[in-house]
Image: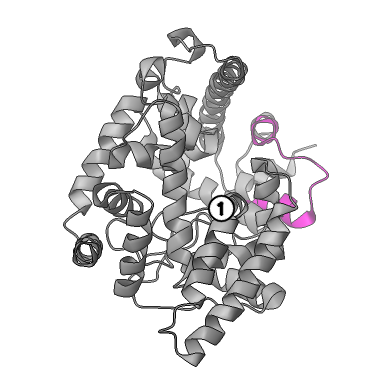
Amino acid sequence: MTSPFRKQGISAPALALALVCLMVPMAAPRATAMSTIDFLTSLSDSEIEAFQVWKTARQNFEEKLDAYWDAVEQKRTLRKRKRAKDIPFSANDYVMSFPPKYQGPSLSGSLASKYGRFLDAQREANPSSSRELATIPDYLAAAKRVYNFVPERVTEKEFKLRYASEAAALGLSKEQVVRVYALETGGVGTYDTQAGIHPIKKTGRAISSAIGYGQLLDANSINELARSGPTFIRLLTARYHDPRNSPARKALLRHKLVVLKKMYANVKHQPFEWHVQQAYAKTQAGMGIHTLNIDGDIGPMLQAMKLKTLQDLAAKNGRRSLSGAELELMNLAGPVTGLEMMDGAGSRAPTSNFFSRRAYYVNKMVKGLTGSQLQAELDRRMTHALTTPGSLEFANAFDAVEARREAER
């Protein structure tokens, strides 16, 4: 009996081979099965053969890539054990090569377009079960619902002045803070900028929960509140008792104190462990806490304290001073990992050793660099963004704060 697909110019053996390459389960939903058939019947025998050659090459490459990242993860696990025992790292503790790159055959333009339409149909028929990333409106809604809290918005100029004041009081320098801002936001970001959203055009879509000048993740907000909540409460209390406050200002600060104390009470009952804080940050109560970053009083404290925490950790590990690029390296890769990338074998190791597989490919800036090269690239980008309006305004804020402190001495 003649195969029905032969009428479409596809031989039975070629069709069977294509099905194997596509790895399509026979029990797939009807919409998915139909889109698979539509794709196959759109191909000639020669196209199926070209597709099979390409698919086989890609599968072989993916196996090599999986093996590479498995080796990276094994090395990372061994370094964690050594770190716990305070054993220095050597080059043998890293994968000293970069991830392999695909060098096999490619699909022709027309075949690639057909395959792309097929994949689009698959995604439409089987939408991802993973939820969309939360955005600023989601965080604000959670804060209102759980804490009856609406962060107070101030102008960018005022927020920068308050941030500069908090940072200076913590011993952070203008050079450190402004360069981190320049890198994280391109020198144009607003204090409510979320990663992936253009701060001026408001285009794009969220790529992470990171917010503000230092781009704190939602879990960072939980972590810093758990660590420094009493300090934030003390500072806000002092602000509440300022005799220059108007009745309205005093009432607003009183409400902020009630909210801040409730938030701190929630986080201090959670184990102080990063994976716990990551999970809590995704709850409605945790999402509400993330909005502290954009409050005119608490946001500058929280954002500046995140950088101070990094500086303190570096000091405990023998680095008494940090450049803006070094501070950002810790901010970007994680505190301990950032320090690891600054010296010894870590500075010579490819950055794939320090980031998850997904993060390595998503963050184009880190690809193909060693630890020391990434630090140099951060410094280069910072310098380039220092002349932007936002960076200049931030630098002026630090100058104004310093002038005021000089006048009060």
Residue at 39%, 15% in the rendered image: 345
Q: Residues within 10 Å of mark 1 (few under 14, many from 20)?
A: some
On the question of residue 93 being in view, the answer is: yes
Image quarter (top left, top right, bottom left or bottom right) of the N terminus: top right
Image height check: is 300 above or below 273? below
The number of numbered badges drawn on the structure is 1
Image coordinates for residue 119, horizontal then vertical, percent: 59, 49
Among the 4 quarters of the image, the one containing residue 24 = top right
- Examine the structure image and report whether residue 125 is included in the region drawn in magenta: no
Q: Which residue is mark 1?
A: 228
Against 320, residue 404 (above or below) is below
Position of 121 compared to 352: left or right? right
* Magenta-drawn segment: 16-38
Q: Amino acid at mark 1?
A: Ser
Magenta stretch prevailing secondary structure:
helix
The reply to whether residue 106 is in sight is no
Residue 176 image offset from top left, x and y in percent: 29, 46
Q: Residue furthest front?
A: 409
Could you say which is closer to the camera, residue 41 or residue 253?
Answer: 253
Task: State left or right for residue 308 relative to residue 150.
Answer: left
* Residue at image location 41% in from the left, 32% down from the top: 315
Whole-percent x, y for residue 185 in the image: 34, 57
Q: Quadrant of the C terminus?
A: bottom left
Specify whether residue 34 is painted magenta.
Answer: yes
Q: Residue furthest right?
A: 27
Question: On the picture, is 239 further left or further right than 32?
Answer: left
SS class, disc 1: helix
Q: Position of residue 394 (x, y in %)?
A: 25, 62
